[in-house]
Amino acid sequence: MRIETTMNRKQLTIADVQTRDVLYYDPDLKKDCYVFCKDRDIDSLPALDDLKTIYKRDDKTQTFEANNIEEDRTISVTMNIFNPIMLMSFRKHPLLLVTDNEELTGVVHFADYGKAIVSIYLYELFFEYEKALRRLLEKHGCGDEDMITYFKYKINKCKEQQTKNRYAGRIQEYGEKIEKKKRSLFEYFYFGDLIALVNHKKIAKLIDLSELRNMIMHAHELVNLDDQDARDYIYSFSSFTTFFNFALELHASYRLVKNRLTFPNGNG
């Protein structure tokens, strides 16, 4: 029997997020090209008639300078968007040229990770991850009462009254719901509580990714504008870095949980 230990889902590639309508440097529209790139913090545009040349923006002269395209400036359409090297690539070149068999198919900017297709993909991944967390807890003999016991433990351990009140409120909130259920599925508990119980029971060591989950579930921007009040289109690379690292951790955590579910004694 073949056992699947990886995620059974289509991984997003650069082909899914690239912008296919490429704008090129037009020597007859130098000023327009410059203003367009300046407003969007785009450092260069590909040449109209030469796929090996790129025109880099020069703010001192407010024009462009022709350069050969560096090898690390291009990215394949088949690259997984959450390959760790993408963060390094965007740090060096915020705008990458997308190629397929050495033909230019589009461009990709780190802001393209804010597209709806990325949010939908991560939404589905979180859905599967939460289900896997519940199965993992059940596999190790945990039930809803173990979560209540954990809340009581936190009340006794915490010194801040506000924290004590929060856990006491959860015990009250979930008490009646648990009594009405016929079997333990943990479906009423918060994502962060599932993570906390897995860690508390030493089943695995997981990072609480509630911040990313809330961004996805509440349709928050994944990559923020550098200045929300400005009239430009410049995006914050630091917000992209935070989001990207969260996404990497989500994939790593899901792989770990799936592994622990697959192996008979997967408890670390």
Image (cartoon, grey):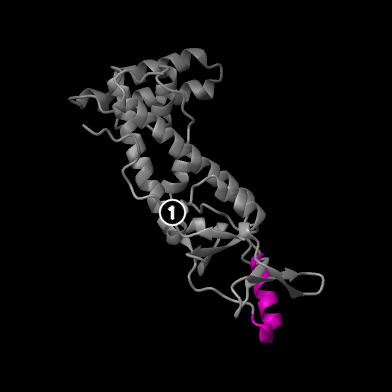
Query: For the view shown, which residue lies furthest in the right direction?
Result: 60
Relative side of 67 to 22, left or right: right
Query: Foreground: 107 or 123?
Result: 107
Query: Foreground: 103 or 86?
Result: 103
Image x and y of residue 39, in percent: 66, 69
Residue corresponding to mark 1: 118
Image x and y of residue 12, in percent: 41, 53
Q: What range of the chain is rendered magenta? A: 26-42
Instruction: Tell me if residue 94 can be seen.
Output: no
Q: Total number of numbered labels?
A: 1
Q: Residue at x 51, y 23 (%)?
A: 163
Q: Residue at x 54, y 46 (%)?
A: 244
Q: Amino acid at mark 1?
A: Val
Relative side of 207 to 193, left or right: right
Instruction: Tell me if residue 259 can be seen.
Output: yes
Q: Quadrant of residue 200?
A: top left
Above or below, comparing residue 109 to residue 151 in the picture = below
Dot 1: within a 10 Å radius of its alpha carbon, few (fewer than 14), some, or many (20 or more) residues? some
Q: Main secondary structure of the magenta part?
A: helix
Check disc 1 and report its element: helix, strand or loop: helix
Relative side of 94 to 201, left or right: right
Q: Residue at x 27, y 33 (%)?
A: 3
Query: For the view shown, which residue lies furthest in the bottom direction?
Result: 28
